């Protein structure tokens, strides 16, 4: 299966997407801040120079739902591009980010593309931006003087207006809002808040103190460092958030922290039974020994999604009807329902499903004998976040293989490589020269598997 980039960008960069807004512009539809003429056929750039661009991470709305994906140029490449004089290669990087975001838009999601300002004069294909959100970052302070006669500002303004003309939403950081205030025709569509070293409280304060008339604009906080900060930002009325989910190995002491629910321990135990190819009769006996689980399983079998199956209110029949793989999926969904009523519950579920499926696909690529164990590894790695527990406490109370424990608690051992790849993708830190991915078919193959896992996770979330 092709990666997110390959499915759109390498197919034909210059093809106008179906349903895109008609734009009156030059035939090649390529513009830059300085009106430099560049080719729109950036697909001629070697594919392996663009490895790492397609990694996406979820955009979470105030509702707590995953509503889109963020795409950016990896940090390892940004500094190199800043000093690069190869405009065609730089334009290819930009096109990969924007066309990846466009593909998200085409399936009804927000496509959020992050573009450094110093790459804008390298050329951008306008129709690749129809309907996406474009964050223009690292904008330098403009020269003093009237913005209407400031050459830098006017060039920037013209570029933004062209982006808006194709239906893109354009935003930037608060330090340029005073300039926009003097030229309201150039008001941004949203305000970008990058965390950096700032606290969430500081970001929320910036959001509350935005100058008029920008207080009503959506705000987008990115590069947040943990699920607690993601949740705090949403509770602080920030519209959209994006960042990394940690392993939650050590949380601040909370006197009222609940214990690990016994049902979680039971569900993971059952999943391990299925992974070990235990007889279904053994699995049935284990389920029947838990009245609550038996009831939930039978209730699920009565739901509309299984209405077309010949089922009876009987545990043996339910297990046989589902089969080993579907039963494993059902147990996974039941486990993830322990996210409860947290603001980011829906996002936690989808990210956990992505991480689990992704590790399983990596295990398949490496021909591991029991790839289901890696699905469990992914799920357990999210249980600290889901249960608001120290991961160490969770791991001590559930039965998982020793290599999984080492990966989760010691960040060591043969299984940790799988987890590290997932964490680096989530944090947008998978470098374009990483050796981590070599044994899995290379970085491009790993990103393809990541895409497949995201598609699968989104489908499971819709089904449940």
Image: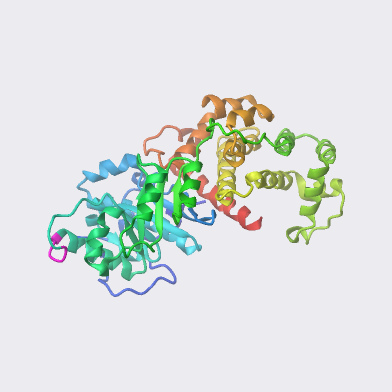
Vertical arrangement, residue 163 with respect to residue 381, above or below: below
Q: Position of residue 453 (x, y in %)?
A: 55, 47
Q: Is residue 243 left or right of residue 120?
A: right
Colouring method of the image: rainbow
Q: Position of residue 25 (x, y in %)?
A: 27, 72
- Whether residue 97 appears in this view of the structure is no
Q: Position of residue 451 (x, y in %)?
A: 51, 49
Report if residue 368 lies within the magenta region. Answer: no
Query: Quick one: 16 or 336, which is closer to the camera?
Result: 336
Res 262 → quadrant = top right
Q: Is residue 456 left or right of residue 28?
A: right
Vertical arrangement, residue 30 with respect to residue 375, above or below: below
Report if residue 149 lies within the magenta region. Answer: yes
Residue sitting at x 73%, y 39%: 263
Vertical arrangement, residue 111 with respect to residue 393, above or below: below
Q: Is residue 211 left or right of residue 457?
A: left
Q: Position of residue 228 (x, y in %)?
A: 50, 42
Vertical arrangement, residue 274 with respect to residue 310, above or below: above
Residue sitting at x 32%, y 65%: 213
- Whether residue 63 appears in this view of the structure is yes
Query: Quick one: 245 or 41, which is closer to the camera?
Result: 245
The number of callouts visible is 0
* Quadrant of the frame with the C terminus: bottom right
Residue sitting at x 62%, y 50%: 341
Res 29 → quadrant = bottom left
Residue sitting at x 49%, y 34%: 420
Q: Which residues are magenta?
A: 147-151
- Does the magenta stretch mainly form a helix, a strand or a loop? loop
């Amino acid at each position: 299966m092709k990666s997110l980039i390959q499915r759109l960008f390498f197919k034909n960069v210059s093809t106008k997407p179906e349903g895109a807004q008609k734009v009156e512009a030059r035939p090649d539809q390529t513009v830059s801040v300085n009106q430099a003429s560049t080719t729109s056929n950036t697909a001629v750039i070697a594919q392996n120079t663009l490895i790492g661009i397609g990694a996406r991470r979820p955009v979470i709305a105030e509702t707590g739902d995953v509503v889109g994906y963020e795409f950016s140029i990896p940090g390892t490449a940004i500094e190199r591009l800043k000093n690069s004089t190869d405009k065609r290669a730089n334009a290819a990087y930009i096109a990969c980010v924007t066309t990846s975001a466009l593909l998200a838009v085409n399936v009804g999601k927000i496509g959020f593309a992050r573009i450094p300002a110093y790459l804008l004069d390298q050329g951008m294909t306008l129709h690749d931006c129809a309907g996406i959100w474009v964050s223009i970052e690292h904008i330098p302070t403009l020269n003093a003087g009237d913005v209407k006669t400031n050459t830098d500002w006017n060039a920037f303004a013209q570029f933004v207006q062209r982006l808006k003309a194709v239906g893109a939403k354009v935003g930037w950081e608060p330090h340029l809002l005073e300039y926009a205030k003097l030229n309201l025709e150039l008001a941004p569509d949203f305000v970008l808040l990058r965390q950096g070293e700032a606290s969430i409280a500081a970001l929320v304060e910036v959001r509350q103190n935005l100058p008029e008339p920008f207080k009503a604009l959506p705000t987008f906080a990115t590069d947040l460092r943990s699920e607690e900060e993601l949740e705090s930002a949403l509770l602080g009325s920030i519209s959209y958030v994006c960042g990394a989910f940690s392993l939650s190995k050590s949380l601040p002491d909370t006197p009222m922290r609940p214990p690990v629910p016994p049902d979680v321990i039971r569900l993971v135990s059952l999943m391990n039974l299925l992974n070990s190819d235990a007889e279904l009769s053994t699995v049935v006996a284990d389920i029947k020994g838990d009245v609550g689980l038996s009831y939930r399983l039978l209730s699920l079998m009565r739901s509309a999604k299984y209405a077309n199956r010949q089922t009876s209110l009987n545990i043996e029949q339910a297990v046989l009807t589902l089969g080993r793989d579907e039963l494993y999926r059902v147990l996974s969904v039941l486990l993830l329902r322990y996210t409860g009523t947290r603001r980011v519950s829906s996002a936690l579920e989808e990210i956990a499903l992505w991480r689990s499926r992704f590790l399983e696909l990596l295990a398949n690529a490496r021909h591991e004998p029991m790839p289901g164990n890696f699905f469990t590894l992914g799920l357990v790695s999210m249980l600290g976040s889901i249960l608001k527990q120290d991961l160490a406490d969770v791991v001590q109370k559930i039965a998982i293989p020793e290599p999984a424990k080492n990966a989760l608690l010691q960040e060591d051992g043969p299984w940790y490589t799988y987890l590290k790849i997932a964490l680096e993708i989530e944090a947008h830190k998978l470098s374009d020269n990483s050796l981590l991915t070599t044994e899995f078919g290379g970085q491009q193959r790993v990103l393809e598997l990541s895409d497949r896992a995201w598609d699968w996770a989104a489908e499971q979330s819709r089904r449940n």
